[in-house]
Image (spheres, rainbow, N blue to C red):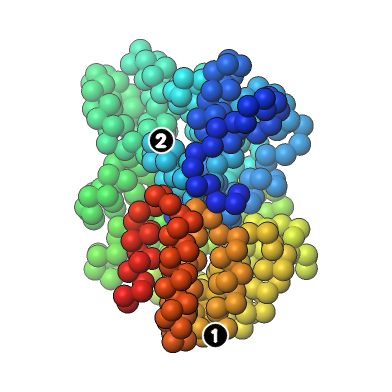
Amino acid sequence: MKHASVLASVLCCILLPLAGASASEAPQSIDAALQRAQAAHLPVLIDFQAQWCYSCYFMATHVLTGPQWDAIEKRIVFIETDADSPDGARWMEKLGVKALPSYVVLDGNGVEMGRILAEQPRAKFYPALERILGGGDKLDSLKAQATKGSTTALADALASYHARNQVQAGLDWYATLPPARLKAAEADGQAATWHARLQMEKAAKDKNTAQCVAAAQHALAGDVGCDRYYVLDTLLQCSEKLPDAERKSLLAAQRPALNALLDSQVFVASPTCVDQRSAVFVSADLNKAIGNTTVEQAVLARGIAAAQQAIGGDFRKDRNAADNLRVYLLRAGRTTDVDALMPNLIAAYPDDYVYAYRYGRSLLDRGKAAEALPYLEQASAKAFGVNRLGVASLRVKALIALNRRSDAEKVVADALEANGPWFPEAAAKLKATLKS
């Protein structure tokens, strides 16, 4: 999830529902979904996703399925929104959505009722969603209960601020609580942990190494559950400037708890922590930082084996696992295996731009412009939104490397025309590619 900060025909505008469209047809924009929800007195569930989002693959095929999901859909207006489309990008900025997947529930007036982040197993997702739909996760309600004395509501309010990426607002609200409430929060494991996580995020943003490390250690000493690897990821980043020996000692102390999590809740038949990729990468990063490259490679090998087992030779069986296999092989430096895998992934998922784009980029990065170009051209036929501009940038680089400047100029012109007024920063970068 956290690594996912990363990039149908093109959405060139925010579409409104067609006149006479039936209520069963999917709304074409979040604004249209809100209009329908207000008329039907239902909440809206927005599924922010993207074609490159590995966690989104997992949720779509493992969680948002079956009778439980069918029952939920009857009680909501549901809309899938690609984060790279103009509508998705606009609403992500409006709601402060920073990671994919994110599931945000709004009432008919557009007021947030709650949100769920990242990959979640069914056993966690549906109770959390039921709580939100029942009004139990409204931030104002949680804050009111906390002020009246509920430490559980206080912890939930801090967690809600964290999920909404409203770190400073959460800390400011916490500071307004009466001394007795603060004392109770400090004594409560969950409330203290969530407060520490908000402090950690603020310190990381402020690049305050000492405060970030201290807050991360405080949080990791509590029950962070499957979020342990997300907190560790922040600790890895904010400890980079520590003296080497001090940093290694700090990180080595986190290995036992992380290894226990991998053994008991990640690499098991029915994992509680289903974001396997983040667990593997954080473990690999931690061991690399400590200097134990043998364990770093071992955890990557463990991920590779798990992904291969889940796929069973059928790349369409589990796209989440197939994509995990790709990145584990890349991280392990097994370029030959990646080169063998990528054509299979392109063939297995021909209806989107993702794998043709990724492989073309990989070849281009290795100086193989002639080999990269056909894959990038294949990707351009399926790319949309901001991704169209990203693919075009790589095509331009490949064409210039092949001394085909006039073709590169046409690629830029065509992409900018199709893009229209959207994504001005990406459009500017595409123009600059011609000058580089």
Mark number displayed over residue 370: 1
Residue 158 against residue 346 in the figure, above or below: above
Q: Residue at x 64, y 73 (%)?
A: 342
Q: Is residue 316 visible?
A: yes
Q: Is residue 9 left or right of residue 222?
A: right
Q: Earlier in the sequence, mark 2 or mark 1?
A: 2
Neighbor class of circle 2 (other Cα within 10 Å; few <14, some 14-19, many 20+) is few
Q: CA distance from mark 2 to mark 1?
A: 42 Å
Residue 281 against residue 434 in the figure, above or below: above
Q: Is residue 46 left or right of residue 246?
A: right
Residue 39 against residue 185 in the figure, above or below: above
Name the residue tied to disc 2.
95
Q: Is residue 235 visible?
A: no
Residue 386: x, y in percent? 46, 55
Quadrant containing the C terminus in the rendered view: bottom left
Which one is in front, 221 or 30?
30
Amino acid carrying mark 2 in the image: Leu
Residue 79: x, y in percent? 59, 35
Residue 31: x, y in percent? 50, 30
Mark number displayed over residue 249: none
Q: Residue at x 37, y 15 (%)?
A: 144
- Quarter of image, res 359: bottom right
User: Which residue is the extreme one toward the top?
Assistant: 148
